[in-house]
C-alpha cells in the first residue's frame, strides 16, 4: 500500500464514511431499537387475510367433496363453510395475539388517602415502663 492510500483510508475512517453500523448515515434516523419488533409484527399481520380466506376455502371445498361422496348436496358444504369461518377467526386471533403480546398491566394507583397520623419513633416519647402506674 502506498502512503497516500493509507492516508485517504484513514481520512475516510475518521470522517465515518466507512462506518457500516448506520450511525453515520441517514438510516440511523429511521431505524430505532424497536424497529425489528415492529417489522416482525407487520410481517405476521400481513398473513391475516390469507389465513382467513384459506380457512374458508378449505372448509367449503371439504364440505363440497363430502356432499359429492355422500349425496347430501348442501348440508356438509354449509356445515364445513362455518367450520372454516370459525377456523379463520381463530387463525386471525392467534396471529394478532402473537403480533401484540399482552403486556403486564400496571395496577391502578390507590385512591388518595389522608396522611396517617405521625407515629413516634421508638426513641421518641415515653417508654412502656414510664407509662406503668403500678396499680395493676
Image: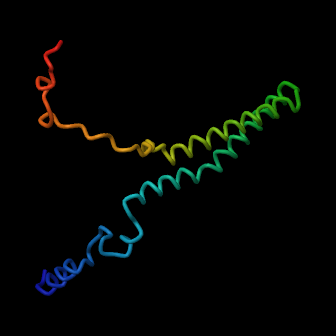
Which image quarter: residue 14?
bottom left
Taking depth in this image into account, of 32 and 65 the one nearest to the observer is 32
Taking depth in this image into account, of 59 and 35 the one nearest to the observer is 35
Q: Residue at x 68, y 44 (%)?
A: 54
As drawn, is 128 to the left or to the right of 38? Answer: left
Q: Residue at x 76, y 35 (%)?
A: 82
The picture places residue 30, in percent across and down from the top left corner, at 42, 69
**Colour mode of the rendering:** rainbow
Q: Answer above or below: position of 104 versus 68.
A: below
Q: Is residue 87 visible?
A: yes
As drawn, is 15 to the left or to the right of 129? Answer: right
As drawn, is 62 to the left or to the right of 9? Answer: right
Q: Can residue 104 be seen in this view?
A: no
The picture places residue 2, in percent across and down from the top left corner, at 12, 84
As drawn, is 55 to the left or to the right of 13? Answer: right
| Quadrant in the picture for the C terminus | top left
Q: Answer above or below: position of 104 versus 21.
A: above
The picture places residue 5, in percent across and down from the top left corner, at 16, 84
Looking at this rendering, what residue extends furthest in the bottom direction? 4
| Quadrant in the picture for the N terminus | bottom left
Q: Answer above or below: position of 18 versus 94.
A: below
Q: Answer above or below: position of 86 versus 23.
A: above
Looking at this rendering, what residue extends furthest in the top direction? 136
Q: Residue at x 26, y 41 (%)?
A: 118
The picture places residue 99, in percent across and down from the top left corner, at 51, 48
Taking depth in this image into account, of 129 and 60 the one nearest to the observer is 129
Q: Residue at x 51, y 44 (%)?
A: 98
Amino acid at each position: 500500500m502506498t502512503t497516500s492510500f493509507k492516508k485517504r483510508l484513514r481520512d475516510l475512517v475518521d470522517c465515518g464514511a466507512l462506518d457500516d453500523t448506520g450511525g453515520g448515515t441517514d438510516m440511523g434516523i429511521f431505524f430505532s431499537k424497536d424497529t425489528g419488533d415492529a417489522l416482525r409484527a407487520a410481517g405476521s399481520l400481513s398473513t391475516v387475510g390469507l389465513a382467513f380466506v384459506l380457512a374458508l376455502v378449505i372448509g367449503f371445498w371439504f364440505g363440497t367433496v363430502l356432499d359429492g361422496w355422500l349425496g347430501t348436496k348442501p348440508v356438509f358444504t354449509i356445515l364445513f363453510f362455518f367450520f372454516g369461518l370459525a377456523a379463520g377467526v381463530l387463525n386471525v386471533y392467534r396471529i394478532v395475539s402473537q403480533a401484540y403480546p399482552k403486556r403486564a398491566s400496571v395496577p391502578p394507583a390507590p385512591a388518595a388517602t389522608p396522611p396517617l397520623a405521625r407515629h413516634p419513633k421508638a426513641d421518641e416519647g415515653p417508654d412502656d415502663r414510664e407509662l406503668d402506674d403500678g396499680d395493676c
